[in-house]
Amino acid sequence: QVQLVESGGGLVHPGGSWRLSCAASGFTFSTYPMSWYRQAPGKERELVARIPSAYGSTNYADSVKGRFTISRDNAKNMVYLQMDSLNPEDTAVYYCNAQRTLWNQKFDYWGQGTQVTVSS
């Protein structure tokens, strides 16, 4: 059974830092690129950051570039999102995602999401 379980959501003050974690199980984690998405109230879900399975560069949305850092630990089946210099526009539900295409079949897994609220 595939599971992606996010943790670490909460309330943080503007300018502060926070870290989200995502625990993966039920699939070969090390072979999947991993991503963080977010969805703010009244807005569409958007890609925040993506990290390849092993080698290659990470990608970030322009709105978080230089402030957020995605990382992974393949030995622990974990992916993280370090968020710095947070502002109220970062308030959203953050989702962990694993996605790959293998032999023309798309595999796409999502976590349940964790709420991050940036407010004074």
Image: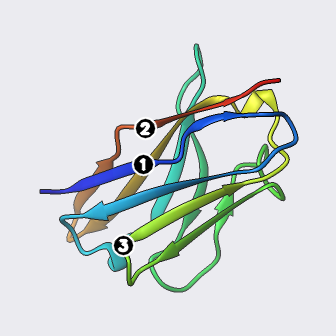
Describe the element under mark 1 as helix, strand or loop. Answer: strand
Q: Which residue is mark 3?
A: 77
Q: Is residue 41 left or right of residue 103?
A: right
State the residue at coordinates (24%, 64%).
Answer: 25
For marks 2 and 3, the one nearer the N-term is: 3
Q: Are marks 2 and 3 in contact (CB under 8 Å)?
A: no
- Three-letter code for the amino acid on which mark 1 is drawn: Glu
Describe the element under mark 3 as helix, strand or loop. Answer: loop
Q: Residues within 10 Å of mark 2 (few under 14, many from 20)?
A: many
Tell me how far mark 2 sits from mark 1, CA to CA.
Answer: 6 Å
Q: Is residue 15 left or right of residue 23?
A: right
Q: Residues within 10 Å of mark 3 (few under 14, many from 20)?
A: some
For marks 3 and 1, the one nearer the N-term is: 1
Q: Are marks 2 and 1 in contact (CB under 8 Å)?
A: yes
- Three-letter code for the amino acid on which mark 2 is drawn: Gly
In front of the other: 28 or 113: 113
Mark seen at residue 113:
2
- Three-letter code for the amino acid on which mark 3 is drawn: Asn
Scheme by which the image is coloured? rainbow
